[in-house]
Amino acid sequence: MNGQNRKDIAIDSKVAIVLKKDQLSGNLTEGIVVKILTKSPTHPHGIKVMIEGGAVGRVKKVFIH
């Protein structure tokens, strides 16, 4: 899943996000979602979330448990 649909992401989901500082390089950071920040049901660049440790970024990949 590509992370553009809010319904695909839940608290405690394992995801790969792109941090603001990594948008040009495309480096991904993996972590567990602690808070979903985007209110709308979809977002073309990925739903914005906070992962454990406080990092905030847009979801690029959702891992299936």
Image: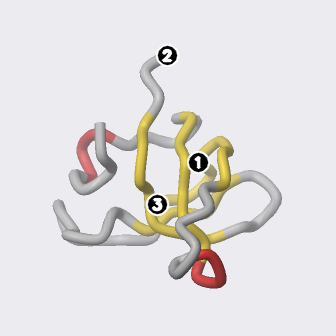
Disc 3 to disc 1: CB gap under 8 Å: yes
Above or below, 28 relative to 45: above
Residue type at the position of mark 3: Ile
Q: Are marks 2 and 1 in contact (CB under 8 Å)?
A: no
Of labels 2 and 3, the one closer to you:
2
Mark 2 to mark 3 CA distance (whole Å): 18 Å
Quick one: SS at disc 3? strand
Residue 7, horizontal then vertical, whole percent:
24, 44
Residue type, mark 1 in image:
Val
Q: How far apart are labels 2 and 1 at the CA level? A: 13 Å
- Residue positioned 58% across, 48% down in the render: 33
Q: Residue furthest right?
A: 53
Q: Which residue is mark 3?
A: 36
* 31 up-or-down from 24: above or below: above
Q: Earlier in the sequence, mark 2 or mark 3?
A: 3
- Residue 55: where, in percent of width, then height? 71, 67
In the picture of the structure, the residue carrying the numbered disc 2 is: 65
Where is residue 12? Give x, y as percent. Answer: 58, 36
The residue that appears at 65% across and 42% down in the rendered structure is: 32
Task: Give the residue type at disc 2.
Answer: His
Residue 50 tag number: none
For disc 1, the marked residue is 33
**Tag 1: Cα neighbours inside 10 Å, few (<14), some, or many (≥20)?**
many
Instruction: List the single residue furthest toward the front.
Output: 25
